[in-house]
Image: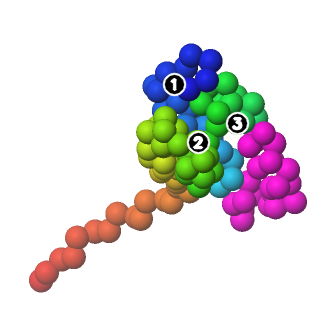
Amino acid sequence: MPRGFGLGAAIVAEILLTAIFLLVILGVTHPQRNAEKFAGLVIGFTLTMIHLVSIPIDNTSVNPARSIATAIYGGGEALAQLWVFIVFPLVGGLLAGFAHRALFERKPLPPVQAEARVG
């Protein structure tokens, strides 16, 4: 890891930054928000900010495909750390999906139905 950050910092960064990125994507592309015109700009700006924050921590991943390619060409130590950049972006993605559903996709509870009377 660059600049003396440890494995724990990389794990936290991958989870949080992936979750933030996916929450932005889910939010800006939601059909009820009418933000399609700005979706590309918002997503691109968010990804830029994520890279600026995480390059000093773990050289940025938030995308397992990018990490796999880099590790193959990097060899040795990069391959040994690859699991972090596969597992924890997936965890961040799951966290974002559940958070988005809980925060923005609330469905009202069905009305309480009276018990059927037999008789």
Is residue 41 in sight in this rendering?
yes
Identified by mark 2, the residue type is Gly
Q: Are marks 2 and 3 in contact (CB under 8 Å)?
A: no
Please provide percent x and percent y for residue 46. 75, 41
Query: Circle 2 is placed at which residue position?
Result: 74
Q: Residue at x 47, y 27 (%)?
A: 7
Q: What range is drawn magenta here?
A: 27-48
The Cα atoms of the two marked residues, 1 and 3, are separated by 14 Å
Query: Circle 3 is placed at which residue position?
Result: 50
- Mark 1 or 3, nearer chain start: 1
Is residue 64 in sight in this rendering?
no
Secondary structure type for disc 3: helix
Q: Which dot marks residue 9?
A: 1
Q: Mark 3: give few (<14), some (14-19) or many (20+) Cα within 10 Å.
A: many
Secondary structure type for disc 1: helix
Q: Is residue 77 above or below residue 85?
A: above
Q: Quadrant of residue 116?
A: bottom left
